[in-house]
Image (cartoon, grey):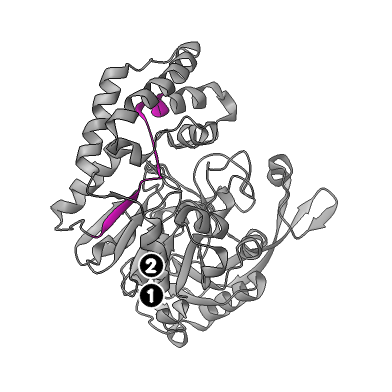
Amino acid sequence: MSVVAVIGGQWGDEGKGRVVDLLAQQSHMVIRYSGGNNAGHTVINDRGTFKLHLVPAGIFNSETVNIIGTGVVVDPAALLEEMETLAAAGVTFDNLFISDRAHVIMPYHLEQDRIQESQRGDGRIGTTGRGVGPAYSDKMERIGIRMGDLLHEETLLPRVRRALDVKNKLLELYGGQPQSLEPTYAKLREYGQALKARIATTHPLVQQAIGRGDRILLEGAQASLLDVDWGTYPYVTSSAPGAAGACQGAGIGPRQVSSVLGVFKAYSTRVGGGPFPTELLDETGTELRERGHEYGTTTGRPRRCGWFDAVAARYVVELNGIDHLAITKLDVLDTLPTLQICTGYQLGDQTINYMPSSDVELSQVKPIYEELPGWQTSTDDARSFDELPPNAQRYLLRLEELTGAPATLISVGPARDASIERVPTYSFFA
């Protein structure tokens, strides 16, 4: 078996796209397993800079099969727009497939998302407004429309009618705009025609690839601290972005996964609401934001920045059985004279080394910091661990000790080759 799951270890935006892009060069198949176009991966390669929201990051390798998995919710309009942008850069899609079991983000989901977020008032969770949450909700309510339904016009119409009967009552109740049956149905038929060559029953493709011993990469969206069960609820996403969700969303059994690679920034960021114990509301936080270009790929919103939280990171390592760490954006720390790592929390008169489940308690904790010296020299040209400044090496080794997993892949810049591989990347698939 050669299946590697790549998951986000913090609150998203860790640089999963560049890691997947790097590993995809050695992969036969890349499967995007969860989330929707509320997430974005930035990939920089010889074709240019691309912001991917639905298309797997392996699309730039024509020899790699790319699958938008069953666990994804798909906005067909957004997908077609993304494909059009990629096509303009010479990307082809003969190697792209969309699971016929993946659910569709409908026009009324965007309207519902907008209304629900506005109704939350001061309790807004920071949704991107892309309709992802309502689409997952309808999936659980069993009134969702799936991508495969777009290929069966005779059954699509009654399913859309049934869904609209429910959704329009809800929209009208909250002062939203009801959706008309005929235009909605016509637009879905149009999407079905445009994507019919790409919609497929993907389970046999995946299992056949496993049977051949192909190298398969599971690409996550969002991140473990946004997991609907294990994240900082209610400030979470609507899916399971961790290793368990990777199996569910891709259609792969847990025992078929050979290793889990967790992607962490060398510091922490978060977009939207929710507790963030190590957040820096000072000049250092601003410096991290500007040096790291910390603005959302999907929304453009400025990201909240802070020190590396080893309590949260170890929690994620344990939850997901992470075998390897990929540490990104180490170069962003190059200018800082000292660094802090959160090694515990002070909650009232208690010292704790775990993440409270209550968002109220987590917002009240005070981080306990360990200070390390910075290196104040560029790491941009380092291509081996030994070429890093001694204090940068010390920082990384301390992250390993605190999280319980080795940092085997380190990025020192956005380009594909700006990486340090402490073990060959192909060994992740072994």
**Viewer-proximal residue among 106 and 82:** 106
Image height of 55 relative to 233, above or below? below
User: Where in the figure is residue 171, as x and y percent of width and height?
Assistant: 45, 16
Is residue 165 in view?
yes
Residue 408 point in image, percent of width and height: 50, 78
Q: Mark 2: which amino acid?
A: Gln
Q: Which residues are magenta?
A: 95-111
Instruction: Tell whether label 1 touches label 2 (CB within 8 Å).
Output: yes
275 inside magenta stretch: no
Picture quadrant of residue 26:
bottom left
Image x and y of residue 265, in percent: 49, 63
Q: Is residue 139 left or right of residue 312?
A: left
Report the residue at 52% width, 53% height from top.
Answer: 241
Can residue 15 be seen? no
Residue type beneath disc 1: Arg
Report which residue position mark 2 lands on: 208
| Label 2 Cα crowd, 10 Å radius (few <14 / some 14-19 / many 20+) | few
Q: Quadrant of residue 65?
A: bottom left
Residue that carries the numbered disc 1 in the rendered image: 212
Residue farthest to the front, as pictured: 154
The structure residue drawn at horizontal position 81% and vertical position 57%, both measured from the top left corner, is 351
Which residue is pictured at 47% across the width and 73% down the height? Answer: 376
Asked if the stretch drawn in magenta spans residue 101, the answer is yes
The alpha-carbon separation of the residues under discs 2 and 1 comes to 6 Å
| Residue nearest the observer in this picture, 419 or 317 | 317
Q: Which residue is painted at 72% across and 43% down in the image?
A: 358
x then y, percent, for residue 377: 43, 76
Judge the density around disc 1: few (<14), some (14-19), many (≥20) Cα neighbours within 10 Å: few
User: Which residue occupies the extreme right position in the image?
Assistant: 349
